[in-house]
Image (spheres, coloured by chain):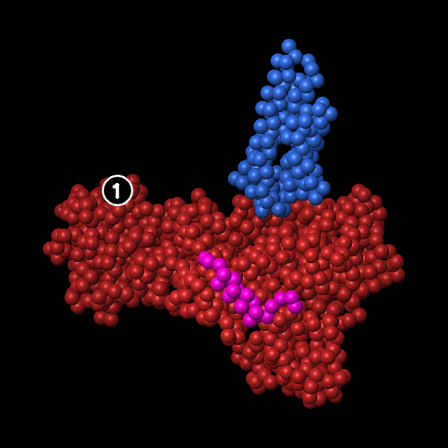
Amino acid sequence: MRRPSAGGAALPPSPSIRPPMPGPAGSGHPGHPGHPGQPHQSPNGPPLQRPPPIGGIQRAPSPMMRPNMSQPGSPGMPRPFQSPQIQARPPFMGGHPGAPGSPAMNPMGFNGPPNGLGQNQSQPPTPKMQQQHLQGPPSQHPPHQPLGQDPGTLGGQMPGPSTPTPHAGHKPKRMYPTGITDSYNEPQPSYDQAPNGFQPPAPGMPAPGPGPVLGPGQVQGSQFFVPGEKQAPAFGQPVPAYQQGLQPLAGQPLQPNMNQLAGQMGAMNVGGGGGYGFNNQGPMLSTVALMGAAPKILDLDAPPPPINLPATASITQSPHANCDPSYKRSTLNAIPATSQLLTKSRLPFGLVITPYRSVKEGDDPVPVVTDSIIARCRRCRTYINPFVKFVEGGQRWKCNMCYTLNEVPSSFDYDSQTQQPVDRWQRKELNHAVVEYIAPTEYMVRPPQPLVYLFLIDVSYPAIQCGMVATAATTILESLDRIPNDEGRTKVGIITVDSSIHFYNLGAESGEPQMLVVSDLEDPFLPQPNDLLCNLSDCRSTLEALLNRLNDMFKDTQNVGNALGPALQSAYKLISPIGGKILCLQASLPNLEVGALKMREDPKLLGTSKESTLLQSASSFYKTFAVDCSKSQVCVDMFLFGSQYTDVATLSCLPRFTGGSTFFYPAFTAAKSEDALKFAHELAEFVSQRIALEAVMRVRASKGLKMSAFYGNFFVRSTDLLSLPNVPRDQSYSIEVSYEDNLSIPIVCFQTALLHTSSSGERRIRVLTLAVPVTTSLSELYMSADQVAISTLLACKAVERGMNSKLDDARDALTNKCVDILGVYKTHMTASSSGATPNLQICDNLKLLPLLTLGMLKHVALRGGSQIPSDLRSYAMHLFSTLPSQCLIPYIHPKFYSLHNMPEHCGTIASNGIEMPLAMNLSSERLERGGLFMLDDSQNIFLWVGRDAVPQLCMDLFGVPNYESIRGGKTTLPTLESDFNQRVNLIVGKTREMRRTSYYPQLYVIKEDGDPALRLWFLSHLIEDRAEPIMSYYQYLGHLKDRVNASSF
Amino acid sequence: MSAEAMVFLFGVIIGAGLLFVKVFFVILISDLEVDYINPIELCNKLNQFVLPEMFVHAFLSFMFLICGQWIATAWNLPLVAYNANKIMNNKHMFDATEIFRTLGQHKKECFIKLGFYLLSFFYYLYRMILALVNDS
């Protein structure tokens, strides 16, 4: 106990509660002339000294300090607690350049209540006062200055009766007039005494146990105080002893720090030292048995385990201070303090980031900081965020990643547009975890590029034949208005290719497009220097004329050549000075010159260990070309159509390294309106997306952690810098995190910064900050593991493994991971730590991990067997590594609904949109002979009709008299008058639009006795069933159990 | 000067050259790790040396073979086979898109080759001196 032995009561009361004393204006501290030179710790000496701060933070709070945080007397006297918070504000405001002498200060409450109730605070703002404000901590709390700084310097950890740290008073001393500096130093004794005033078991006071931590609401309320309203009463009231102690502490200039302390300390007390700042009040670890019950799949949509940050971890306590899981989620919502703990738990540690998520109606838009004031740490370049600490009266901030002190930019509290001081606590970057800055010129190497869309369309015989060219031309024509073109800078160009390359002069005076043919494929050149790429608004009519005629121009072609490689090279020549997007629409295998590909699929290889060679790129041209593109900010997107082998594996290399997307339409024929609709919808959505251009992305983490592996579509330009020529909406990136050092901090932060040019031509930085507590306990670690994020990360890792070594390895790795996690859990978290157990147990929040793993094992991307063409597999793998969790989870574990017996309200429009039926377990037990079922895997929708479906159902839904007349396969549901048809149509419609991607799921009708291939395809989604050679869910659990029991962890 | 001395003198010179190339590789790879160089540049620089290095090494081994230096040939043969295998599988070049994933591997290989060339260098030097002493 560090409490001073000298009785607190005997000592003079702390300055803050001195009776109001209207001292002469300008002399800040009339009460202290008596002890000018008193040394800081003189009365109490060494016992009071707090050990110097070591890296930080988690020093056990001395119990006697706790009452500061709780509100023992709150019902009776809220005021005294509020008042210090009020006092906390001024320094920031005072610190801003517009302030001196401006009368605005008082109305905004900088100088305390104008009503004269406070003692020093209430002095009229004389010029001298203002001066002091400007320079540093507010003059009204001079005695508290050293302490006020202290917690800040410590990262807001704990106020204690303290000696000043090296920082304390260091800067102000230089800046203040000597008189003031002296008076700053002088009142130290009263600090030392302060704590005496509130010994924990003070009579009449609640025990200091888990006292109510200052709630966010309370604090929030007090942050925006009304001058004079709350401050004064403290002085007029009889102040209980413990408040005397509180007072000086609370007088710290930095209220938010104080709140932070409160939160941390409160949490630490509860935690009993078990973890750093982890709040144990959350749900306890609940273990569930896996076997013997159907998995509770409804929990797949549950939110991730809560991030139990102390209530006051963020300085503003804004509800948006921490990142939304749809932007960024961590696989672990409590970070192990040591790498040993992580290794012991065997849980994968990584981040799943979707930085450029689309914002639909009803979502909060990303707030934009418009004033170009970007506060960044000078050492680690972290952006200021809600988890930093302000110290030294708000003049500096302490980075929450590397703990460097940084100056707050001088105009941080000032609105240059209105010429008014602004409240720092209202700043968006301190209130929102997801924020966008408008970047000044330092963040540009050139003026922001305009949007450029260059369509590279295959017009060889197969492409014309399947109707791709006609559909594409119509779609592009119809979406010209939807292409983002805010400033009229968007450029568009079209190149068509067969065995020669055709350019189109879009800038011709006549308004007639002019075709220029280049047949030299060895050294393709641009036939003319300009007008091949033309401003969308200027060349609109020419472009329309061209698109209208495009299909007719080639409709009789017999040319089967496809010189994609040379065409790409010339497209690159055309576009590389600006950068932009090349959209390749390819319906045949490139077969001429560089980049020619062979039909390399060999059914004999499928299902063998050699299969992964088919999943790797066949030609090095595409990789090198992708690297060149990435260097010149060119992105290539692939729309692949094909009735035959299209080598998705090779062609998807281009999007993979240039931040693009791949779309694959197997067996596309525009004669089927469903095919055409799907393609048209996706292409239109894709070109109308407001994408980001010339982007780089970097993820920073608190000291001790580093990003070790990256998965997704981008080029890794240095150890932690991802370069993305384009950032499409809703593409997800997974990043594995590893340890460099053990963590000795209570909260770890991950900050993703995406520097990009928006489609409206602004250079912007999108910053996502995620703060997660650190823990030392294995149970907290397990309790906070996020099965959805873990599955997303594991899916990416499995795909990488499958492509680079063998699919078998990938599958084994998945199962091994599952066994490891279950085994460690069994050994360390359950009673039956060793020996065989009859059941498998895992914590509630990981209970679906085995099911999701099984889903991946049975998925087209990873499933064994020789039935899956490598194109389909490559495409599924591409989706695995780019889909955001929201779509990936249904892709792995489809949603399965029973429609024939759904409750009345399903499929009707309720207050929160269209009501969906409850999802069911993916097992064929659920299928009924007379039923209608829907299965949705986020890429396709299946309607399964049982063979005994009653004619009424067929009539209501399909408008046909009986089951026999239903046509299976790709279908569009008719729109009928019947209630049931409308409800099903609504459900299908909702399924198509409820996720945030541009994929348009296609509807298949599966008849129970229909086409066997379709039926098998449908049944392969029922992953709880046994599907040779992979086990059923229960068999899989049994297999996991045997392996868990067989090995030791 | 005997043929033996000649071939080992040749070996010493080539060995020194190979040694330098490997040191250059190691330096560039560590530059990449600390972000002094971007992967595209690194690969462009390193790739122009990969094949020459392998061919020069194969040529040296061939020289030892025709001069009947069986020990030296046997010592070099595994590396020749390893290089040949890499070329056959088209894995000899540095790939900018994969470089960070394979960096550890590349680094390890570089250090092993560096050690190999160092040992070879001293062996050739020793044999050269031995041959010269025997000559005189």
Q: Position of residue A306 (x, y in %)?
A: 43, 65
Q: Amino acid at mark 1?
A: Pro
Q: Colour of chain A?
A: red
Query: A317 and B81: which one is in front?
Result: B81
Q: Position of residue A868 (x, y in %)?
A: 70, 63
Q: Quadrant of the N terminus of chain A?
A: bottom left
Residue at image x 27%, y 66%? Answer: A211
Residue range of the region highlighted in magenta in the rendering: A1028-1049
Residue A951, compared with residue A872, is above or below; it is: below
Q: For chain B, give the colour.
A: blue
Check the image and report above or below for A36 versus A72: above
The residue at 80%/60% (across/down) is A463
Name the quadrant of the C terminus of chain A.
bottom left
Task: Answer whether residue A187 is visible to the viewer in this image.
Answer: no
Q: Residues within 10 Å of mark 1 (few under 14, many from 20)?
A: few
Residue furthest to the top in view is B136
- Give the dominant element type of the magenta stretch: helix, strand or loop: helix
Q: Which residue is mark 1?
A: A177
Horizontal placement of A878 versus A851: left or right? right
Task: Report x, y in % for residue A737.
Answer: 50, 52
Whether A456 is drawn above or below B63: the answer is below
